[in-house]
Image (spheres, rainbow, N blue to C red):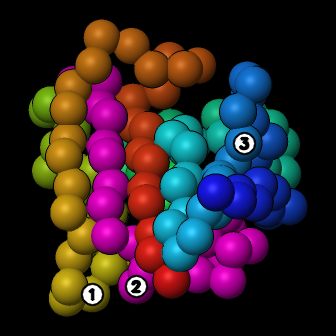
Amino acid sequence: MSKTIINAQHAPAPIGPYSQAVMTGNLLFVSGQIAIDPKTGNIEAKDAAAETTQVMQNIAAILGAAGLGFEHVVKTTVFLSHMSLFTIVNEVYGNYFSNNFPARETVAVKGLPKNVNVEISVIAAK
């Protein structure tokens, strides 16, 4: 098994000992992304909708660095600080996909890194 580490310049650097994404075979595993603005390294988003937009932009940058796009995403995992954010996050998230939506689960968790409200990871296939 070979694996290639993907590092996108226009996505935030990892905040721990992990890679932005790993490609193995025809699968790309993108680590959970939070709303870190790659230009500042800070959380600039003021609400869940803005957080979700930044998260999806970060994912887009990583997918692009691997030569892929949202049409290649086959699975997503959405972590929320509270399930009351589900509808707001869904509205933003849905703008990044057309038809043929990926499989997904959404879970509410007790806490997320940097006290954000949204974290999303994806798996994409060539």
Residue shown at the point (21%, 26%) measured from the top left: 108
Residue type at numbered disc 3: Ser
For the question of whether residue 47 can be seen, the reply is no
- In the rendered image, residue 105, in percent from the top left (x then y), is placed at 19, 46
Q: Could you give the CA–CA distance between mark 3 and mark 1, rounded to whole angstroms?
A: 28 Å
- In the rendered image, residue 81, in percent from the top left (x then y), is placed at 30, 24
- Answer few, some or many: residues within 10 Å of disc 1's Cα (few below 14, many 20 plus, some between 14 and 19): few
Instruction: State the residue position of label 2.
Output: 71
Left or right of residue 38, residue 72 in this image: left
Residue type at numbered disc 2: Glu
Q: Are marks 2 and 1 in contact (CB under 8 Å)?
A: yes
- In the rendered image, residue 73, in percent from the top left (x then y), is placed at 39, 72
In the depicted view, which residue is nearer to us: 115 or 101?
Answer: 101
Above or below: residue 15 compared with residue 31: above
Q: Specify start and end residues of the magenta stretch as a single range.
A: 61-82
Instruction: State the residue position of label 3.
Output: 19
In the depicted view, which residue is nearer to us: 110 or 43?
Answer: 110
- In the rendered image, residue 7, in percent from the top left (x then y), is placed at 80, 57
Q: Earlier in the sequence, mark 3 or mark 2?
A: 3
Left or right of residue 18, residue 122 in this image: left
Q: Residue furthest top?
A: 110
Instruction: State the residue position of label 1.
Output: 98
